[in-house]
Image (cartoon, rainbow, N blue to C red):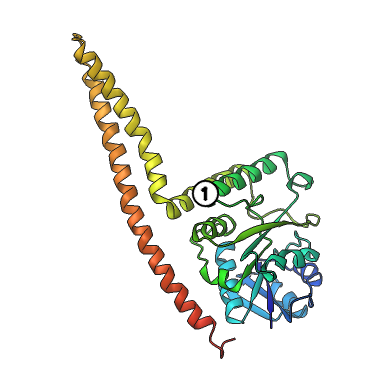
Amino acid sequence: MTKLIIQIPCYNEEQTLGLTLSELPRQLPGINEIEWLVIDDGSRDRTVEVAKACGVDHIVHLANNQGLAKAFMAGLEASLKAGADIIVNTDADNQYCAEDIPALIQPILFGTAEIVIGARPIQDIKHFSPTKKFLQRLGSWVVRLASNTRIPDAPSGFRAFSREAAMQLNVFNQYTYTLETIIQAGQKGMAITSVPIRTNGELRPSRLVKSIPSYIHRSILTIFRIFMTYKPLRFFLLLGSFPLGLGVALGVRWLGFFLMGTDRTRIPSLILAAILILIGVQLIILGFVADLLAVNRKLLEDIQLRMRRAGYNNPEEK
């Protein structure tokens, strides 16, 4: 028996949710049971009423708007408790073509992947500005670099998870889950792949990309935070190498002048070199400390995974 749950995070989506739900499948080859789950992220409109009218099987209520990342994780938890073997996440604005769900879950059904990301035809999406298309490509490249994966469309929210993969995910960022889950999957050694998907016309402007400067700022902070969390030693080694290298270069320069017997003391250069070397060494030491903390985090994640397996795989709950 294979159970698929399609989850949709929602925040004031009464205008588009009905259309999105009307295109979702109730039967698919290789799937014995399909259920729909809506996460109400503190909506103030008729989102919940629309979901009920469309026959949604599960509704998760968040008292206040907590953001897309929290809503996504709440949906994963509820789907696991409901006994999902495969979880598909899609958006409530009908951005993604529901007819591509069979292609999205196929690698999981065949056992070749644990996470599948839908890759949109970014260059062909008319309502994406050239700047946004460039940022999408740049962000995906950075995520591929940080995660050691080959996902061409990292910000895509149309994705599928196996039960085992969903139990291993944690999202610390409050802005979005898309980048962090890919980097986390790559660091954990999960089998992750992508499949080409289609998109529908734009029904409303994106709520994540309110403005290009804001999107750039948030994305940069997200990537830096994720990189610090999952690769702390490499991050602080790279960060500390710049002041350390510059300080050593200034120190060698001062020593050269000193050995040549110059009349000028060049004390400011020597002080600056000492400060830069001290900053670099402190950052590198901080990297080693952060790396030790990362080891502790991995141990805690292993304990959390065992607890989740014990809880979610309980026959009474499933």
SS assignment at label 1: helix
Location of the C terminus (image quadrant):
bottom right
Location of the N terminus (image quadrant):
bottom right
Question: Quick one: 211 or 108, which is closer to the camera?
Answer: 108
Q: Is residue 14 visible?
A: yes
Residue occupied by mark 1: 146
Instruction: Write the residue at 26% across / 32% down.
Output: 275
Q: Is residue 113 above or below residue 243?
A: below
Q: Is residue 97 left or right of residue 73?
A: right
Q: Is residue 288 above or below residue 1?
A: above
Which image quadrant for residue 86?
A: bottom right
Question: Quick one: 266 or 108, which is closer to the camera?
Answer: 108
Question: Quick one: 13 or 81, which is closer to the camera?
Answer: 81
Task: Tell me where residue 292 appears, x and y as whole percent.
Answer: 33, 57
Q: Is residue 29 left or right of residue 257?
A: right
Q: Is residue 53 above or below residue 226?
A: below
Task: Tell me where residue 231 appears, x and y as whole percent.
Answer: 43, 51
Which image quadrant for residue 274?
A: top left
Q: Is residue 67 visible?
A: no
Q: Is residue 34 left or right of residue 229?
A: right
Instruction: Write the residue at 75% across / 75% down.
Output: 50
Q: Residues within 10 Å of mark 1 (few under 14, many from 20)?
A: many
Task: Tell me where residue 108 appears, x and y as whole percent.
Answer: 67, 68
Residue found farthest to the bottom: 316
Q: How many marks?
A: 1
Q: What residue type is disc 1 on?
A: Ala
Instruction: Write the residue at 27% across / 22% down.
Output: 252
Task: Tell me where residue 3 appears, x and y as whole percent.
Answer: 68, 79
Q: Is residue 224 left or right of residue 211?
A: left
